[in-house]
């Protein structure tokens, strides 16, 4: 359960600090918004291991975002930028369509010093 709390806290941070809507976060983990809200409230059972892994991917994304951007405003701005490495999509739109792994990969590369 401690792991799930950590992932759900990441979800709340992505919503509160970075402006991702709950419907976008639900899409990112391939579930419904109502199910996401049940998990947040702690009602209706815990997510299955597949969903916990998807929530963990959001946590990893957030850790990489924090490592790259000390300034939250800069991080929010980056989420809205179209990036050639994402074929002209924004990181936010990629996350909302379930491609958090691709965005995290971009962050890994940027944190390693790659010029993208």
Image: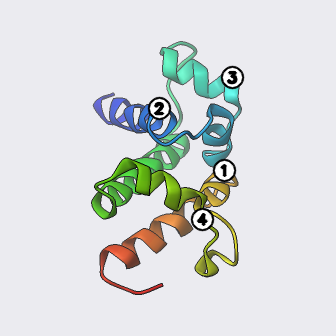
In the image, residue 28 lies at what x, y percent? Answer: 62, 48
- Residue under label 3: 34
Quarter location, residue 69: bottom left
- Residue under label 4: 81
In the image, residue 24 lies at what x, y percent? Answer: 66, 41
Give the Cα separation between the discs numbered 1 and 3. 16 Å
The residue depicted at 42 percent of the width and 50 percent of the height is 73
In the image, residue 19 lies at what x, y percent? Answer: 55, 39
Q: Which mark is residue 96?
A: 1
In the image, residue 84 lies at what x, y percent? Answer: 63, 81
- Residue under label 2: 16
Give the Cα separation between the discs numbered 3 and 2. 18 Å
Mark 3 / mark 2, whichever is N-terminal: 2
Determine contact: label 3, label 4, CB under 8 Å: no
| Marks 1, 3: nearer the viewer | 1
- 112 above or below 49? below
- 89 above or below 80? below
The residue depicted at 54 percent of the width and 41 percent of the height is 51
Give the Cα separation between the discs numbered 3 and 4. 29 Å
């Amino acid at each position: 359960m401690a792991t799930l709390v950590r992932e759900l806290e990441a979800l709340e941070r992505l919503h509160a600090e970075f402006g991702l809507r709950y419907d976008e976060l639900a899409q990112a983990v391939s579930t419904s918004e109502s199910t996401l809200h049940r998990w947040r409230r702690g009602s209706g059972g815990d997510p299955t291991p597949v969903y916990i892994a998807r929530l963990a991917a959001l946590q990893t994304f957030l850790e990489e975002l924090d490592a790259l951007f000390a300034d939250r405003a800069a991080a929010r701005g980056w989420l809205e930028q179209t990036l050639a490495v994402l074929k002209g999509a924004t990181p936010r739109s990629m996350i909302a369509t379930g491609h958090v792994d691709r965005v995290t990969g971009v962050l890994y590369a940027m944190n390693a010093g790659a010029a993208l």
